[in-house]
Image (cartoon, rainbow, N blue to C red):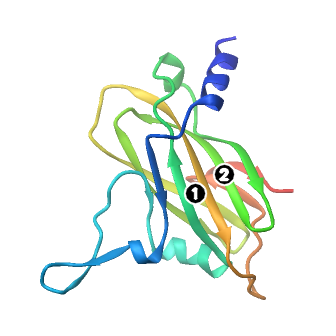
Amino acid sequence: MLRVLLMLLFAFAGFSCSSQTTDEDDLSYVDENGVLRNKPLNGTIILPYTHNYLSVLNAGYRAANVQKADCSDHGEEVYKERDKIDQVIVTDSTIEVHVRIYDNCCYDYLWDPKLTDEGVLDLLYTGYGMFCGCNCCFGHVLTFRKEYDPDDAVEIKEIRINGAGTYRLK
C-alpha cells in the first residue's frame, strides 16, 4: 500500500525544482574582456557536446530538456530501491524518458547520454553538490527531439540508466 501511495505521489509531483532547455546559443557567453567562455555548470543539466552526447547528435537527436522534481520521499524505502525507468513516450519527433533516481537529498545531476552502436541509449549521470545525510527519490524527465534522420543513424532500441535497468522500445 505504501508503495502505491509513493507511486501516486511521484506521479502527481510537480517538476518545479529544476529545468534546463538545451540551446546552443545558451552554452557560452562573452566575458568582460571579449573572450568566449563556457557557462559554468549549475543545477541539473545535460552536459553539452561531450563525446557521449555527440553519439546522440549523430543519430539525429538533440537533448531538448531535462526536468528534476523535488524530493518526493526520504523514508527508509529509498535506501533499498534502485534507479528505474518509469515510462518512455516516443513520438515521430521526440523521445521522453521518465526516470526515478534514488540518491543524496542535496544533489543535482549532470546527465551525459550516450548512444551505443547496438542501439542502447544509456542515460549516464553523476550526482554532485552538497552532501546531506539522507537519500531521496527524484523524478527526472529527459526529452530528446528528433532533428533529422541520417541514412546511417543507429536506431534506439533500448534505454538504460548508468548501464543498468534495460527498457526495450517497441
Q: Quadrant of residue 26?
A: bottom left
Q: Is residue 44 left or right of residue 11?
A: left
In this rendering, is residue 125 above or below 132? below
Query: Which image quadrant: the C terminus?
Result: bottom right
Q: In the rendered picture of this protein, how many numbered marks are placed on residues?
A: 2
| SS type, badge 2 | strand
Question: Marks 2 and 1, Cα distance to the nearest angstrom?
Answer: 10 Å
Q: Position of residue 35 (x, y in %)?
A: 20, 86
Left or right: where 133 falls relative to 137? left
Q: Secondary structure at mark 1?
A: strand
Q: Amino acid type of disc 2?
A: Val
Mark 2 in CB contact with mark 1 (< 8 angstroms): yes
Quadrant of the rendered image containing residue 115: bottom right
Residue 127 against residue 7 in the figure, above or below: below
Nearer mark to the viewer, of 2 and 1? 2
* Residues packed near mark 1 inside 10 Å, few (<14), some (14 to 19) or many (20 plus): many
Q: Which mark is residue 97?
A: 2
The amino acid sitting under disc 1 is Leu
Q: Residue at x 53, y 40 (%)?
A: 15
Q: Which mark is residue 26?
A: none
Residue located 47% across and 51% down the image? 19
User: Residue 123, which numbered label?
Assistant: 1
Out of 164 and 78, give the one closest to the viewer: 78
- Counting from the top left corner in percent of width and height, residue 63 is at 57, 66
> Which image quadrant for residue 82?
top right
Query: x and y percent of residue 99 in the render?
Result: 61, 43
